[in-house]
Image (cartoon, helix red, strand yellow):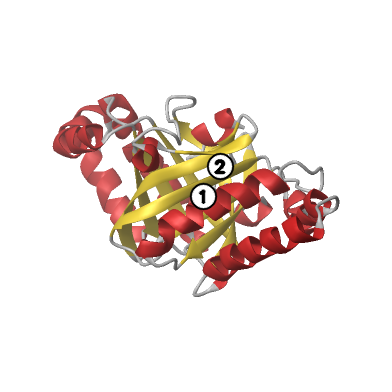
Amino acid sequence: MKKLLSSLLMLLFVGIGSTFAQPAQEYTFQKYYLDVNPTDIPRFLELHKEMTDASMQSDLRTLNGHYVKRHMYAGKASLVLYEVYDSVDDLNADDLWGSIGEYTADMSQEDLEAFSARAAEWWSMWLEGHTDEVRVLQVSGFGDEDFSWQSPGVIINSYYTPKWSDGATFREAYEALDKATEMCGNAAGSRISTHYSGSGTTYEGYVFYNSWDDFAADEKAIQECRQQYVEDLPAVTETYWGVAGEHWDEIYIPVGSYVDGEFKLSAHFTN
């Protein structure tokens, strides 16, 4: 699982994207945008760890990756959660509350009431103001095990709205520029995803950095790297922005992920 969304990046794609070049491997993920008040985030994470660790003890849970990041700059959601699956069928089969039921089956009435109160508090913070969508993660880009969701890293989320008919053209230009990011050597990895269902952008790009210093170094060097590593950069750039549609970026930090049998927080939240 660590490899998968170390590959996630993040950490997404199925046949709907036939106008996009098809990657060797794809994962489906549910993306949740939460509106937890910043002052309530520590309490939410405390409860989220308890509920995640409890539910993941059951075979009724079919996800193979769970990741949380926190908004830092731009954007609206205070927290974003990813639940990653091998397929849409696995996503549909996932049974959070059934697994919670198994976990609480042998509790005393007193323990059950206390646990139920905490679960209700957690779920209330999750639901209020949230939105969600299903996307498909494409295992392309670069990087594999270099990015840890327990490190004090930085995640850049880029959103694009190319027309589906321009999908292949946009992706080709995007990947040409992404190659320069890889060759610059400052980023730990990158991934892309496309929209599947719900409300979301056509295309999302993710770039992971192990530190703010690495991110700053990349911002400083990226144009020179593009000039060095992207063939016919002016034409690629013109094509890229010509079909990208609306575009914006958001900056996040990793909160943590489910790894080695438990939800583990990043150094951002443990130091």
At x 44% / y 68%, what residue is drawn?
Answer: 35
Nearer to the camera, 46 or 247: 46
User: Is 220 located above or below residue 244 in the figure?
Assistant: above
Nearer to the camera, 12 or 256: 256
Horizontal placement of 145 versus 176: left or right? right
Horizontal placement of 100 versus 14: left or right? right
Of the 4 image quadrants, the one containing the N terminus is top right
Q: Residues within 10 Å of mark 1 (few under 14, many from 20)?
A: many
Given the image, on which type of amino acid does mark 2 rest?
Gln
Q: What residue is shown with label 2?
A: 138
Nearer to the camera, 264 or 153: 264
Could you say where residue 147 lies in the image, as x and y percent from the top left? 42, 30
At x 39% / y 38%, what residue is drawn?
Answer: 270
Secondary structure under badge 2?
strand
Secondary structure under badge 1?
strand
The answer to whether marks 2 and 1 mark residues whose Cβ atoms lie closer than 8 Å is: yes
Could you say where residue 148 lies in the image, as x and y percent from the top left? 44, 31
The quadrant in which residue 182 appears is top left
Q: What residue is shown with label 1?
A: 193
Q: Earlier in the sequence, mark 2 or mark 1?
A: 2
Horizontal placement of 4 versus 57: left or right? left
Could you say where residue 18 lies in the image, as x and y percent from the top left? 62, 52
The quadrant in which residue 26 appears is top right
Given the image, on which type of amino acid does mark 1 rest?
Ser
